[in-house]
C-alpha cells in the first residue's frame, strides 16, 4: 500500500509542473509574436510616416533641424507648390492616360491568350506558350533602342502611344503565365460540361472561364499596375517633352541645377504618389488575398 501510494504521489507531483508549463509556453510565444509583429510594423510603417511628416517641413527645417524632428507647422504649402509649380497634376494625368489603357490591354489579351493556351486543345499551343514564357526572360533594357527606332520611323514619338504599346508588350508574358496557371487549377469537367451543353469557345470563356478566376485577375492586374505605375526607365526613354512625362519621371524635375533639391515639395509629391497607390491596394486587398489562395485548394 505504501509503495502504491508513493507511486501515485510521484505521478501526481510530476504531472503538475507539466500542466503548468503549457500556458506559460503559450504566453511566451504570444509575447514573442507580439514583439516581432510590433518590430515589423515599425520597420514597414515608419518610413511612410517619416515621408508624410517631411512633406510638411520647410527647406530651412530640412537643412538645420534633426531628421527626426516634427514639423514646426502643418501648412499645405509644399503640396500646393508641388501641384502648381511642379506640374504634378499634368504628370498624374499622363500616368493615368498611359497606365490604365496599357493595363486593360494586358489583362484582356493576356487572359484570352491564357484561356486559349491552357483550356483549348489545338496543334502548336505548347510552342506558342513557350514563346510567351521566353518573353519573361528578355530584359527590358535590350529592347529599348530597337523600339525607339521603330517609334521614330512610325511617327509615334511625341505621344503616349510608345508607353502604352511597350507596357502592354512587356506585361503580356507574365500575365499569360500566371493566368494559365490559375486556369490549370480549374477542373476540366466544368469546361467539358459547357461544351456538351452546346457552348462555344467564346461563350465558355466569357460566362465560365472569366468569372471563375476573377479574383486571380484582380491579383495579376494589381501586380501589373504597380509595375507600370512605378516604371521610370521606359517612361524616361520614350517621353522627350515635359508635358508628356509621367509622375515618376516628373519627380526628377524637383532636382534643380547643381543637384539642389526642394525637399518639401519633393516629399509632398512622393507622398501623394505613395498614398494613391496604397489606397488602391487597400480597396482591392480582399480580392488580392482570394486570388493568391485560389490555386491552393482544388474543388
Image (tube, rainbow, N blue to C red):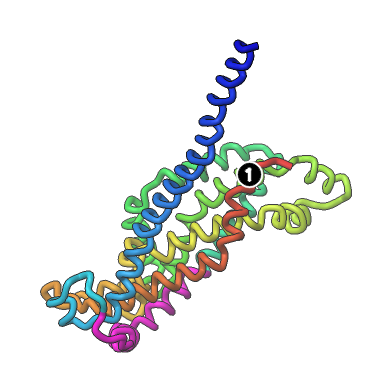
81 in magenta: yes
From what the image shows, is residue 257 above or below residue 21? Answer: below
Crowding near pointer 1: few (<14 within 10 Å), some, many (20+)? Answer: some
Q: Is any part of residue 241 visible from this angle?
A: no
Image quarter (top left, top right, bottom left or bottom right) of the C terminus: top right
Please count the marks in the image.
1
Q: If the image is split into quadrants, where does the N terminus sit?
A: top right
Q: Is residue 113 above or below residue 90?
A: above
Residue 267, percent from left and from top = 29, 75
| Picture layout, residue 244 above or below residue 10 | below
Q: Residue at x 66, y 49 (%)?
A: 115
- Camera-side residue: 223 or 16? 16
Residue 217 coordinates in the image, percent (x, y): 61, 57
Residue at image location 53% in from the left, 24% down from the top: 14
Magenta segment includes 219: no
Residue 1 at least partly seen: yes
Picture residue at 52% right of the left edge, 45% below the top: 132
Q: Position of residue 30 (x, y in %)?
A: 48, 47
- Could you say whether the residue bearing mark 1 is in a helix, strand or loop? loop
Q: Residue at image x 39%, y 69%?
A: 274
Judge left or right: residue 27 versus residue 66: right
Q: Nearer the viewer, residue 67 or 274?
A: 67
Tell me which segment is drawn in magenta: 71-100
Task: Identify the residue under disc 1.
Answer: 295
Q: Nearer the viewer, residue 244 or 49?
A: 49
Picture quadrant of residue 160: bottom left
Amino acid at each position: 500500500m505504501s509503495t502504491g501510494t508513493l507511486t501515485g504521489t510521484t505521478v501526481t507531483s510530476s504531472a503538475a509542473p507539466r500542466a503548468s508549463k503549457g500556458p506559460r509556453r503559450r504566453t511566451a510565444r504570444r509575447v514573442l509574436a507580439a514583439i516581432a509583429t510590433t518590430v515589423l510594423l515599425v520597420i514597414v510603417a515608419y518610413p511612410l510616416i517619416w515621408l508624410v511628416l517631411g512633406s510638411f517641413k520647410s527647406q530651412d527645417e530640412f537643412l538645420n533641424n534633426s531628421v527626426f524632428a516634427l514639423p514646426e507647422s502643418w501648412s499645405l504649402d509644399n503640396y500646393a507648390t508641388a501641384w502648381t509649380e511642379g506640374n504634378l497634376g499634368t504628370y498624374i494625368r499622363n500616368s493615368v492616360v498611359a497606365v490604365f489603357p496599357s493595363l486593360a490591354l494586358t489583362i484582356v489579351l493576356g487572359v484570352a491568350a491564357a484561356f486559349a493556351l491552357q483550356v483549348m486543345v489545338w496543334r502548336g499551343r505548347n510552342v506558342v506558350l513557350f514563346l510567351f514564357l521566353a518573353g519573361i526572360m528578355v530584359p527590358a533594357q535590350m529592347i529599348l533602342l530597337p523600339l525607339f527606332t521603330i517609334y521614330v520611323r512610325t511617327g509615334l514619338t511625341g505621344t503616349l502611344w510608345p508607353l502604352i504599346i511597350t507596357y502592354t508588350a512587356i506585361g503580356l508574358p507574365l500575365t499569360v503565365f500566371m493566368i494559365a496557371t490559375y486556369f490549370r487549377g480549374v477542373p476540366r469537367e466544368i469546361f467539358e460540361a459547357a461544351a456538351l451543353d452546346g457552348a462555344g469557345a467564346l461563350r465558355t470563356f466569357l460566362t465560365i472561364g472569366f468569372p471563375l478566376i476573377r479574383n486571380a485577375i484582380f491579383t495579376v492586374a494589381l501586380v501589373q499596375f504597380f509595375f507600370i505605375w512605378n516604371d521610370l526607365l521606359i517612361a524616361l526613354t520614350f517621353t522627350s517633352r515635359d508635358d508628356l512625362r509621367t509622375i515618376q519621371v516628373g519627380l526628377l524635375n524637383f532636382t534643380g541645377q547643381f543637384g539642389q533639391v526642394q525637399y518639401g515639395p519633393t516629399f509632398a509629391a512622393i507622398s501623394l504618389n505613395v498614398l494613391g497607390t496604397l489606397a488602391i491596394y487597400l480597396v482591392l486587398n480582399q480580392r488580392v488575398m482570394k486570388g493568391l489562395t485560389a490555386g491552393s485548394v482544388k474543388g
